[in-house]
Image (cartoon, helix red, strand yellow):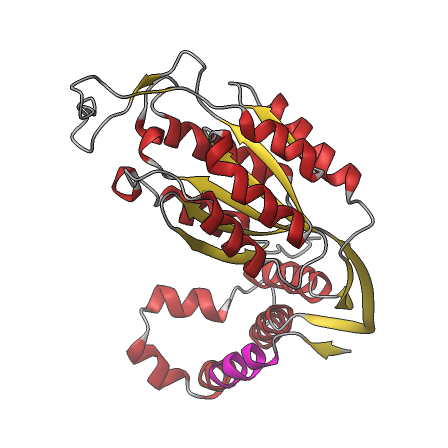
Amino acid sequence: MTFANPYLFWILIVPFIIFALLISTNKEKLSRVFDENVLKRLSASDETIPLMIRNMTMFVAIFLMIVALARPVIEKGDKVVDVKGLTLLVGLDISGSMRSTDLYPNRLEFAKKKMFEFFEMMPSDEISVLAFAHSSFILAPFSADKQTLQMMVEGVDDSYINMGSTNFSELGMLASEVLDKKEPKIVVLFTDGGDEEAIAGFADILEQNGIDLYVVLVGTTKGAPVLTREGKPFILEDGTIAITQRNDALLSLAKKSGGEGIVAGHGKEDIQKLAEDIKNKYHDEQQGEVRIKERVELFYYPLGAGLLLLLIALSSIPRRRR
């Protein structure tokens, strides 16, 4: 048997021994420090049980609780646990069109909400997050901690939005670099799409690097005005208001690359289906092993015994009368 927290035992045992000695051998000086009623309660000097026995019972009870805090365990050695998971690169579109309000409250916030749902559906997988528009950059490195990833994505607000057009070629180069030593190579984009001319170079990069593309499209085909940072409609050079519609060209590219694409709705069923498709396709990939210590916890035995003895020491047990 060993202790999981041995330092707690040594930290608490010294003041416990001093306390026990003061109670047992230095009663007169102790009465100057403690209130008379408190000292009487600590000493448990009820006439129904001899003082020495009650004090010893209390000391044993406190000692057992200290042992319980130190967590006695029986070590059974290391246990190898198989871990199955995927490594995915997730991208969030921060181009100017993501300010459009055809989805509440806007496309960017709606895309973030769908991304959080995706994190929830992939609990044991390692995910890295990047943001992309005219340029692309990493928001979070690979991690299985979904709460941390969500906090990083939550920080992406309106100030991140770039009014320049999306550079899909740069996005592809960054994705191929990040996924260079990963197998399989999976990219999941949350975006309002891109036209065929813009994604032409992107398709070549995906094919050359063996990257499977999955797309979650946000926005409507009806479209909405592009908004500036001040929330006003963006005016083109000819004086007309810029309108942006969802572009579905990425759906075809995703299927061509070996992936899949969906148009995001308001329920969770779409993201759940996408996550299931990814898991079903790559279920035998990225297997690993983790060694964990297998232990049998024993703390509840001294804790239970200590509480029972403390209850006895602090109780008033009447004598039998003839």
**Rendered-image quadrant of the N terminus:** bottom right
**Is 302 a magenta residue?**
no
In the figure, 248 relative to 83: above or below? above
Looking at the image, the residue that sits furthest to the top is 222
Residue 124 in view here: no
For the point 62% across and 56% down, the residue is 317
For the point 65% across and 54% down, the residue is 209
**Is 12 a magenta residue?**
yes
Between 152 and 168, the one lying in front of the other is: 168
Residue 34 in view here: yes
Q: Which residues are magenta?
A: 6-15
Total number of numbered discs in the rendering:
0
Q: Quadrant of residue 213?
A: top right
Q: Position of residue 79 (x, y in %)?
A: 82, 67
State the predominant SS element of the stretch in magenta. helix
For the point 51% across and 37% down, the residue is 199
Q: Is residue 33 left or right of residue 297?
A: left
Q: Quadrant of residue 281?
A: top right
Between 198 and 124, the one lying in front of the other is: 198
Q: Position of residue 78 (x, y in %)?
A: 81, 72
Q: Position of residue 42 (x, y in %)?
A: 46, 68
Between 41 and 127, the one lying in front of the other is: 127
Q: Position of residue 139 (x, y in %)?
A: 42, 53
In the figure, 316 relative to 193: above or below? below
Between 204 and 168, the one lying in front of the other is: 204
